[in-house]
Amino acid sequence: MIIKNVTVIDGTGETPRSGMDVLIDAGRFADIRPTGTGTSSGTSSSAASGGWDDEPVLDGRGGYLLPGLWEAHTHLTEMGMPVAEIPAYMRKTLAEYLQAGITSVCDLGGLYLLPRSERETGRANGTAPAVFCARAGFTGVNGWPANSRDSHDSHDSRGGRPEFVKVAGLENGGLFQIDDADTARRHVQELLGQVDYVKCMFDGATGGAGRRLPRAALEAIIEATHDAGKKVLVHIATGADLREAVQAGADCIEHSPIPRDPADLGEAEQLAGILAEAGTHYCPTIVTWEQLGRGGDPAYLDELITDGILQPDGVAEITARPGYGKPFPHHPADKMKIRFDYAMRSLHLFHEAGVKLVAGSDIAPVLPTPAHGLLRELQLFAKAGLPSTEIIATATSRAAEKIGKRGSMGTITVGADADAILLDADPLTDIAHLTGLRHHRAVISAGHLVRH
């Protein structure tokens, strides 16, 4: 396939290149060159053998081509969902991601996934996004979310673990509850061959009798995982958690922290400095706090309609959901409003410090689909003052880098996987040209045209 006469926004932060032709061959970007010239800026066997003249053409005139989006933090099942319903729900959710231009998805939930063969076939055929997984989480004894009444162990009471998932040694529905470094090291070794990265819950706000994962255990997990060439993504709750996780060698901090003093941005400035100095990625999932804090407020739904995330005829479906307007375990609405407000007011400090920001949405209890969660997160980044170039990077090259896929995915560069969105307007002038699906002229996944 050749995409002709398009402006390329490659996801790396480089200046956009207008009037370019992009050749896709064998599921990868094979060549990129100025329209109407014989000089290639990349080389490939297809281009060298005359493939430019033999491929079908997608007219990109007036359009903007950027990498397919990444959802860098989600959960592909809902808490409490009966096991029998999970496969159909996952297939539907993955199809919705792809239709929204989200060509790669990082699941941080764990246990329940479609068979690897089905996921790989869907990816190769361009009928499903690339899916990366943790398969399990490490937490302290009775730590989050084991101390939640709605934690994943609720699946066991509804029919047990599904046969399409086999993970050795897991207890409590995908959680290793760890009390020492030796146990942590043993379990992570069991898991490493089955996962794309490792997820740890280093949550100092466990509540009740719950205990945080011991620092020594976190360090042991990170060391063993890094020895295997994989990344460790660490869920935190407080600024103190963030500091220790970075010191322990975490590759990405998941979630913005609960502020010590909501009126003082000094803590955020200090944390931004720590993350920037260490080169640690940061996935704040601000849309999570927005939904948990504002989810039962009709004015919030009105705002989502105004911003194009929710259609008026979709309000009834949202408000009819069993959990609508009800407290979320471990996350009181008033505290989540504070967390949301602080994250929005402080996000620019992380950008200005040079922190590697990544886009992820976590959950979507008050949004039409999980795919809309990522689109809303990008909108919130814009509302918080991030420039469009940075926002695009958070959901493309930076997200790929977070899980060790730098260079091979997340950019429009020669040799990278051919995942892309063709827009009819410039997303650098207005991020709404990316988050508004009406501006999507085409979606390409693994070299296949899946939406046009």
Image (cartoon, rainbow, N blue to C red):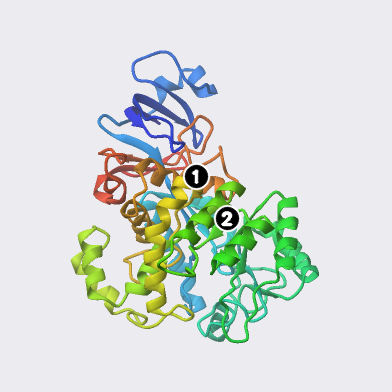
Quarter of the image containing the N terminus?
top left
Residue 252's disc is 2
Pinpoint residue 30: horizontal percent, then vertical percent.
49, 28
Residue position marked by numbered label 1 in the rendering: 354
Q: Nearer the viewer, residue 38 or 389?
A: 389
Q: Is residue 128 in view?
A: no
Q: Amino acid at mark 2?
A: Cys
- Left or right: residue 317 versus residue 312 is right
- Name the residue located 72 percent from the left edge and 72 percent from the top edge: 169
Among the 4 quarters of the image, the one containing residue 5? top left
Graded by Cα atoms within 10 Å as few (under 14), some (14 to 19) or many (20 or more), the crowding at tag 1 reads some
Q: Nearer the viewer, residue 283 or 257?
A: 257
Q: Is residue 16 in view?
A: yes
Q: Nearer the viewer, residue 172 or 142?
A: 142
Pinpoint residue 338: horizontal percent, then vertical percent.
39, 71
Among the 4 quarters of the image, the one containing residue 56? top left
The mark lying in front, picked from 1 and 2, is: 1
Q: Are marks 1 and 2 in contact (CB under 8 Å)?
A: no
Q: Amino acid at mark 1?
A: Gly
Quarter of the image containing the C terminus?
top left
